Image: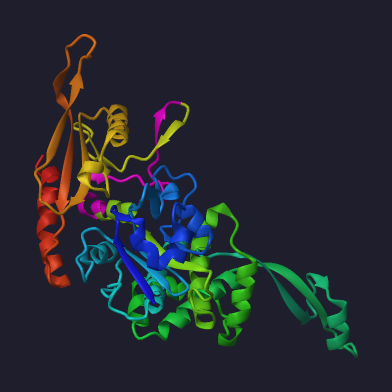
Amino acid sequence: MKLHKIKDNSQQKKDSFSDIGTLTGKIADKTLEQLEREGVFVFPEIVKDAEDITRDQMIIQSVNDSYRSGNVMGFLGCGDERLIIESRFGGEEDDFFFQYLLDRVMDFPNIVDLESDANQDSRLFNFLLFLFPYYLKTAMRKGLFKKYIRHSYNDGNVKGAIDIARHIEKNTPFTGNVAYSQREFSYDNSLMELVRHTIEFIKRKPYGRNLLVKVKDEVKLVIDATPGYEPYDRQKIIEENKKNTVRHAYFREYLALQRLCLLILRHQKHQIGSGSRQIYGILFDGAWLWEEYVNSLIEDVFYHPMNKGGKGAQRLFACNIGLIYPDFISRDNKVRIIADAKYKPLDNIGNRDYLQVLAYMFRFDAKAGYYLYPEAEGSDDMKLWMNRGSTYEANVSPRDDISITKHGLKIPVDSTDYAGFVTKMKTHEQEFKQVFTTR
């Protein structure tokens, strides 16, 4: 197996990718949206009207004689070639920061070291299993999935279309029953059966029950809603779901869950990535993980609109024009603060970022803006005062009432084990939050 490792937000010479040339040729300069259509599992799922960069973000982008990586972390493969994308704060052996983000945001089991399993395909499969509780909980917020299915009956209470052939077969000589079928709105349908098969499959894993205990209420609802479940029906249920994917926009969360269940269950019959020309893998949007992690730290001080969930949408103008989703809007409406989570190095926060936050500040009458980013150096905050005046009149000077501050959260890079990393992170988190809690 040919394995190559890179860091997010980094740049490497194209020559260094020569040993995984086939895989590189299939992913270079392609967006997450394109790779998702080709079978790569992207978390969180792509949302068409999302304002963020997710849809157009590239895994590796050509820059002269080099490839530049973005905010994506995860695992990709093609044939016997593998690419691991770690966080830029990871060490030579361990990537504690990526593990910590997954643990805080998604309650992942503490076993996600990409190097700890010699079989990278098994590691990828475990990632898919760990995602299941999150996707199940998200989908079930819409309630149990119902759809019309056709049931066949043979009794004297005729309510649907009579099945002549089946009637002759079963009711000759005539005994008073009639064979008929009827379309009924039911919870016990092919999609809920697929979810049930996935639950039963995960239960048989050594860590399966511990994984499902986080969604025990949702699991009970699925089990109660699928009395027709039969273990030997798995392949038939898989084929039905492959042919009949969820189409209604309201149930897009169930579409993501359906796709994940199919990946998990089909792994048993067809190994993930079987075939030398197929791309496979799982990718995590680091920007989304960072934003949700920051929210877990400051949610008691800030509102958190979410474009991927369509929650907390704001408008720049009257008549519902100018849809925006600021990352964070302070709950204090007397001294309003706008904050933007940026999973990128300090030096990469530039002009477009400034314009975006200043527009949000203007919209919400905020005098202070913040960029919240991860850093390894432990640098002091950088406070930028907005200018007034014009170079044409030679009267440019800094204002003393409007500012944007680059506020970093220090990420430990010298920890020897995960427990030590967590301890240091807790200390740095308190320092990070203190800016907002002492105002």
Asked if residue 36 lies in the magenta stretch, the reply is no
Q: Residue visible at 16% across and 31% down?
A: 384
The x, y position of residue 161, in whole percent, is: 82, 70
Q: Going by the image, does 185 lie left or right of 388?
A: right
> Residue 366 appears in which quarter of the rendering?
top left
Q: Going by the image, does 351 lie left or right of 266?
A: left
Q: Going by the image, does 126 lie left or right of 330?
A: right
The x, y position of residue 397, in whole percent, is: 14, 18
Figure disc tally: 0
Residues 3 and 105: in front is: 3
Which quarter of the rendered picture does the N terminus lie within? bottom left
Magenta segment boundaries in residue numbering: 294-318
Q: Residue visible at 26% across and 56% down?
A: 293
Q: Residue visible at 86% across and 87% down?
A: 169
Residues 211 and 351: in front is: 351
Which quarter of the rendered picture does the C terminus lie within? top left
The x, y position of residue 408, in whole percent, is: 16, 47
Residues 7 and 375: in front is: 7
The answer to whether one can see residue 31 in this image is: yes
Q: Is residue 15 above or below residue 433?
A: below
Asked if residue 305 lies in the magenta stretch, the reply is yes
Q: Is residue 431 above or below residue 238?
A: above
